[in-house]
């Protein structure tokens, strides 16, 4: 899939040191996320995230990109298409630069992504957040995601799994 036109903002694959540096600044601006999901990000752990795929999925379905406005990094999107089933995509990481939060940008980007995925033939977008993270819970519920289950991750975190019908 070509995600270059999914958003009204510039979409860049995170595949070089400059893009990783910009993505890292977004991660650093969100310490609350890492309070709930330690350890705190490093450039090395971010590089590992770029190539991490869940079981039964591969890099051909992985899309890790940065949304930019001119030279300003706005958000990171980590998406696995056709996971956990052919009609569903999984949002592994969605993070908005803290300096742009509270202005509706995150919700706008979620809407753009959902519209793009629907036009591409997907029926659902699934994601998870760490139970007890009030910021994540409020954001995803506000954006029409419904809780479908809770489970424990390999790292021992309690994950709230939610999805949105597209």
Image (cartoon, rainbow, N blue to C red):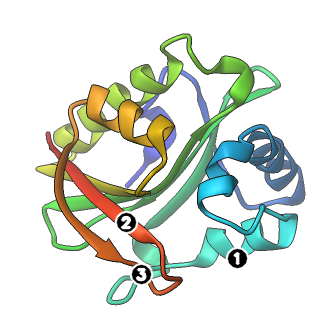
Question: For the C terminus, which image quadrant?
Answer: top left
Kindly identify which numbered label has been placed on residue 54.
3
Which residue is the site of mark 1? 48
Residue located 57% across and 23% down the image? 9
Residue drawn 27% across and 34% down? 141
Residue at the spot 22% in from the left edge and 40% down from the top edge: 145
Q: Residue furthest front?
A: 132
Q: Position of residue 109 (x, y in %)?
A: 44, 28
Element carrying mark 2: strand
Q: Earlier in the sequence, mark 2 or mark 1?
A: 1
Q: Does residue 26 sit above or below 46 in this rendering?
A: above
Q: CA distance from mark 3 to mark 1?
A: 13 Å
The residues tagged by marks 2 and 3 sit, at their Cα atoms, a distance apart of 15 Å
Judged from the image, the secondary structure of the residue bearing numbered disc 3 is: loop
Q: Secondary structure at mark 1?
A: helix
38 horizontally vs 77: left or right? right
Q: Residue at x 37, y 66 (%)?
A: 159
x%, y% of residue 48?
70, 76
Residue on which disc 2 sits: 159
Residue at the extreme top of the image, as rendered: 103
For residue 69, say whether it is visible.
no
Indicate left or right for 153 with 121 as reference.
right
- Image: 88 above or below 124: below
- Residue 90 horizontal/vertical position (percent): 33, 60
Q: Nearer the viewer, residue 107 or 129?
A: 129
């Amino acid at each position: 899939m070509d995600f270059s036109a999914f958003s009204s903002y510039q979409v860049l694959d995170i595949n070089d040191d400059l893009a990783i540096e910009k993505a890292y600044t977004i991660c650093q601006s969100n310490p609350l996320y890492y309070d709930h999901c330690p350890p705190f990000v490093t450039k090395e752990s971010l590089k590992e995230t770029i190539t991490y795929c869940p079981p039964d999925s591969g890099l051909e379905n992985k899309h890790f990109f940065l949304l930019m406005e001119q030279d300003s990094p706005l958000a990171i999107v980590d998406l696995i298409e056709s996971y956990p089933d052919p009609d569903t995509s999984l949002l592994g990481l969605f993070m908005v630069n803290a300096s742009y939060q509270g202005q509706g940008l995150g919700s706008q980007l979620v809407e753009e992504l959902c519209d793009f995925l629907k036009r591409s033939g997907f029926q659902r977008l699934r994601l998870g957040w760490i139970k007890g993270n009030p910021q994540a819970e409020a954001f995803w519920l506000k954006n029409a995601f419904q809780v479908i289950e809770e489970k424990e991750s390999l790292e021992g975190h309690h994950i709230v799994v939610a999805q949105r019908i597209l």
